[in-house]
Structure formats: structure tokens, C-alpha cells
Image: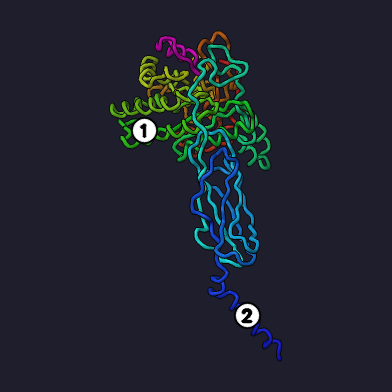
Amino acid sequence: MSRRAKLVPLALFALLVLTPTTLAANGSVRLATGDFTVGEGDGAATIAVVRSTAQGRGEVRYAAWHRTADHRLDYTPVRGRIDFADGQTQATFRVPIADDGNVEGRETIALGIYGAYPQSVGEPDRATLTIVDNDAVANERDALNPLALDPPPPADNPLEGATFYTNPSTNLAGLIIRQIRGRQPAAAQLLQTIADQPETKRFGAFNDRPGAAVAQYLARAQADQPGSVPLISTYRLKHVACGGYSDTPEEVERYKAWYEKFAEGIGNHRAVVFLEIDALITTKCLSRAGLKRRVDEVRSAIGSLAVLPHAVVYVDAGAGDAHNGRYIAKLLRKVRVFRIQGFFTNSTHQNWTRREVRYGRELIRRLGGRSHHVVNTAANGRGPLIPHSRVRFGNSYRCNAPGRGLGPRPTALVPPRYRNLDGLIWIGNPGRSAGECSKTPNPPPAGTFWVDYAVSLVRNADFRIR
């Protein structure tokens, strides 16, 4: 018999082995259900896999991967193989679950099986594992020590003594340093000045799941630097050219829902929150209905955040070189600033620190002495760039103004003579482009880190309070 003839029976045998009839005779393997549930505090989820026949040995592979749950914070991804013994119809695998302390609602993990032998894969071969959160926002808040600092801060400044979260390798400037270190070593070295300071992490409309985004950031901050206090800001509103703009009622409701989720994500975490950059300074551009809705939006956001047990919240109050104090103080009352720690100023300006302190004092006086404030010093080391015509260009060039420099480093240890001033913080992210409104030719799009501009801020830095 020829070699070719000997191979024919083997080929026929292989075809017979793989026929649907034979596979059906061997049965199938499937997940026990399409929906599994586990409590966050249970430690692990046990996932049952069953096969339709007990005869002979068998095997199947499994895996778990994320949907809304975060594999770095909420669970441990798994993959592996289950081996069935002769006579066995059911087996299990486990998915470790982390009890992270975040108030985050229900989160989901995808499950799947594949590669069964000699059985086929039956249905369901895909399932959802739902993690039921066991955390709730605490009801009690220590008004004198909301950040739970040890030792407690003085009665007039809840930030004093806090170590603000700093991670030079993962903040905005740090990521850029890693990208350019090889080709621009000198620039990378200068940018380290920015990376070494506490960054105010920004959240906004670009976060379609704000609760999950802020919860993950705060949890990672605690893991990176236990006991530290993260600084976060929000920029959720739309700011358009003056012309009587007004949010629609639907946009207002989406705004409120966004902040409810954002507050839920902060939950019991410690954080300093700078609420809604430019929220009040831009109100002159709104229609009458738009102003009413803006106040409603910011008031609702304050209401969502004010109840958090370990969040110290400040709302935007413009800048001293933009509006008069009477107008802003009136708006601060309308948005119910007294429900939170106070307000912040200079977030998108470069006004001198001392002028902003005076402006803050004026607002506090108009508020009956019942509030506190923070000044942004991210880019005011050289003060504002004054145009030759204020009538035509305004009080200062604010958009990527050339020649500006870093201002006083972030701190809550301010001179005692500055009463009701809780801190000097880099609320703006030094080096982030403000967009095409710049006087400098061909600036990057808004929000992009601009290396040349950031380097200029470092070179022109003046960390003194001026």
C-alpha cells in the first residue's frame, strides 16, 4: 500500500471525530447563569460552570474582565482552566473582589468561557458579575476638622497641616517629562519644578462617568501617598462668547445629575474641591434667563458637595481685576456660599497675589465676615500683562500671556496677617494652553500641555508673595 493510501483512513477518522453528531454526544459546558452577584465585602465571587454530561474527563477555559469595574481598584482579573473529572458535572472559579471604601454604586465585570474539550461550549457562555457596593456616605461631618487631620488644624483654617497629594511621575507635567526627557533633557529638567508641586486634578464635561473617574483618582492618590489630601477642580459649564447665551432646561438637569454623580464618587474620601472654574466671572455674558439658570446650576452643585464628610469646597469668585466685589458677593450669596468653606479667585488670571488677597477680603466683608478664600498662584509670579488699551483689550491679557511666571508655591501656611485666607494653591495647571486666543502665534489647542510655555513659566518664576 502506498504512503498516500495509508493517510486516507486517518483523514476520514479525523472528520468523523469532529462531526456535530460526535460533539453533541459529548455534551456541552456552560455558565450556570448569565447574571452573578457578589457583595463588595465578600472577598471573592464564586462562579459556577456546569456540563451536561458526567461521562469522561473534560476541560474549559475561563476569564473575567472589566466593564464598569476598575481592575486596578475593584477586582483582580483572572483567567485559567477548569478540569472536570469523570463523573463531575459542576465546577467553580473565583474572582477576587476588593473592598475599596469608595461610594460608587453597583459595578460590573464581564465573565466568559471558551475552548471546551471534548464538549462544546453551550449557552450562556458570557455573563455579567455585579459588585454590590457596601459603602455609604457618612452622615457626620466635623466642621472644625473635615479632613480628619492629625493633629487637628487651627479653628480658622481646615487646610493647615494637610499634606497635599503630589505624584511627580503621574501628574500632567510628570507625564510630559517622561515623553520628552530623551530629546529635550533641558526642558524636562525645568518642568520638574512644576511636577514636584501638588497638582489640582481637573474634571469636567469630558468625564462622561464623573463618579467613577473621581473615585478612581482619589483611591489611587490614597494608595500612592497615604494620608495625603488631593486637590481637585471642576470645569463643567460651557463658556461661550458674550451674546445672551442661556443653558436649556435639559442642559441644567444634565449639569445637576453630573454633580450628583461626581459627589457620589468623592464619597468619604478626603479632598479639597475647587468648584466650577469661571462659573461666576462669566455671568455678565448671560441672558437674564441664563443667569438665573447659572445660579440654579451652581447652587445645586454646592448642595451636592456640601454634605460630603471630608471635602472642603470653594466656589469660583472670579478675580480682582475682572469684576467689582459688590456684584460677585451678590452672586456668592445667591449660590449659597455659606454652605461650603468659601470661594477661590484668580483661577484663569495672573493678578498679583496681594491684590487678590485684598479682593478676597472685600468679598468676605460684603459677606458679613462669614467666609474664607483661596488664591490661585499658578502663573502670577510676574503679575498680569497689561494691554496698552484696556478699553479695547480688557484689564489684562489672560490667554497664554507671554512673559508670565510661576507664582508662590502651593501652601496652606499663609502669613497670619492674611485672615480668612486658607491657602495659596496652583488651581490652574501651569503649562496647559488656553487655546487660540493667545498673543503668541500658533498656540496648541485649549487644554493641551504646551512645553515651551511651561518652560517660560519656570524661567520667569517668582515664588514670593507680591
Quadrant assignment for the N terminus: bottom right
Q: Residues within 10 Å of mark 1 (few under 14, many from 20)?
A: few
Instruction: Give the image quarter of residue 193.
Output: top right
Q: Residues within 10 Å of mark 2 (few under 14, many from 20)?
A: few
> x%, y% of residue 297?
37, 29
Instruction: Give the image quarter of residue 158.
Output: top right
Camera sees residue 298? yes
Residue nearest the viewer, comparing 447 with 73: 73
Q: Residue at x 36, y 17 (%)?
A: 330
Could you tell whether 243 is left or right of 185 in the image? left
- Secondary structure under badge 2? helix
Residue nearest the viewer, comparing 218 with 443: 218
Q: Are marks 1 and 2 in contact (CB under 8 Å)?
A: no
Residue with the mark numbered 2: 13
Quadrant assignment for the C terminus: top right
Residue nearest the viewer, comparing 193 with 257: 257
Q: Which residues are magenta?
A: 356-374
Residue with the mark numbered 1: 241
> x%, y% of residue 334?
35, 20
- Secondary structure under badge 1? loop
Dot 2 amino acid type: Phe
Q: Which residue is most to the left?
A: 288
Dot 1 amino acid type: Ala
